[in-house]
Amino acid sequence: MTSHLSEPTTRRLRVDRLAMAHPGDLTALAALLDADALRADDIVAVIGKTEGNGGVNDFTRGYFTQSLMQLLAQRTGRSAGELLHTVPCVLSGGTEGVLSPHYVVFSRSAAPARSGPGGALAIGTAIGTALPAHEIGRWTHVRSVAAAVRAAMADAGIERADQVAFVQVKCPCITSARATAAAADGQQVVSADPGRSMAFARAAGAFGAALALGELADDPALAAALLADFGIACARASVSSGVEVLADEVIVLGHSPAWTGPLRMACAPMADALDIAAVAAALAPLGIEATPQVRQDQRQRIVAAFVKCEPDRRGQVRGARHTMLDDTDINAQRHIRGAVGGLVAGVLGDSRIFVSGGAEHQGPDGGGLVAVIAQVPDLPSSTLSREAIA
């Protein structure tokens, strides 16, 4: 398990949302580094949205990661291999509809003074050890994610689960080659179908986050509920899976009195793909109104937005039939990303949104969640506790 930095007395988080012209384009980040507006050594995590297909064979995620690690290696003097094991880079492919390719860079540094008793937005990261293919999507995987979430909370200086606003996880999946290799070693994988294995990995990631946050018991019998009992969910977890990672990568965002600065975060569950009220619910604790669209002056305070969504497996949205699951031309996840992405972008007035499909056990069944980071200099983080948001 790897994590960052010893604990300085006070720390400050910086969040930069940057555009990309193609999946390997890091010119916006390079410009910030060249201008000394940002130090490469302060970068601790990246979450991005690339224009690939979002499937098992989406090469854009690996392309961006490789380009990022090469740039950071040049600027820090560390090897790209070392950076891969210390800087989580969580990517979601698929910018359907109005969604715009972009990436969010999280950096942290020592700060001269505390902001006050409420604290500010904090970040912690952790990367677990490489998972054998036969453990992906099983209870050992759930425990692995839980351990990484706890390590990331400690890295952020977040002491209580109710201080956590959002947990971003990237899990490995089982490719055909990995399944074959496991079988040769006498091991059985949870599914040899790569797409199905991604769903199991996302489910294990959500259960792991819930376990770490005290929302779920550490009971191996609950493994039977993975992709089966969708009443079990974590409304603060966003989990992706891909071939480009071999270990769980975790980013925890929450509020801590050990941090300073104007950034705060709120997260709300989406009941279904039409739940526009959930976007307003995520904005309200940040002092931002959607009537029905966020005003320009308030829009400028929003620095990042993250969404998880899922085509309702029952084939209906509010009693009306949908065809996302029956379309053999367009994958259902591409349908839902375009639909929910348009809904959230319409409220925010901004298409630079991280929208990821595959929301198994992440928010309500058939729904998902929406989370927003904004500049809220006069709002104490104590008003952003889980209880206050609920």
Image (tube, rainbow, N blue to C red):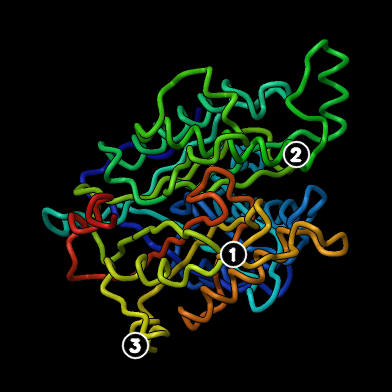
Relative depth, front residue between 283 and 152? 283
Check the picture and name the quadrant holding the C terminus.
bottom left
Rendering coords of residue 29 (x, y %): 56, 67
Residue under the image location 48 percent in, 50 percent down: 363
Q: CA distance from mark 1 to mark 3?
A: 37 Å
Depicted 122 relative to depicted 185: above or below: below
Q: Residue furthest left?
A: 117
* Picture quadrant where residue 6 is located: top left
Three-letter amino acid code of the residue under disc 1:
Gly
Q: Is residue 24 visible?
A: no
Disc 3, SS:
helix
Q: Which residue is denoted by mark 1 in the rendering? A: 319
Residue under the image location 76 percent in, 23 percent down: 189
Residue under the image location 19 percent in, 67 percent down: 379
Relative depth, front residue between 186 and 234? 234
Label 3: few (<14), some (14–19) or many (≥20) C-alpha neighbours in 10 Å: few
Q: Which residue is denoted by mark 3 in the rendering? A: 297
Q: Residue furthest top?
A: 186
Three-letter amino acid code of the residue under disc 2:
Arg
Disc 1, SS:
loop
Three-letter amino acid code of the residue under disc 3:
Asp
* 257 left or right of 123 in image: left
Q: Is residue 295 visible?
A: yes
* 208 left or right of 28 in image: left
Rendering coords of residue 323 (x, y %): 75, 64
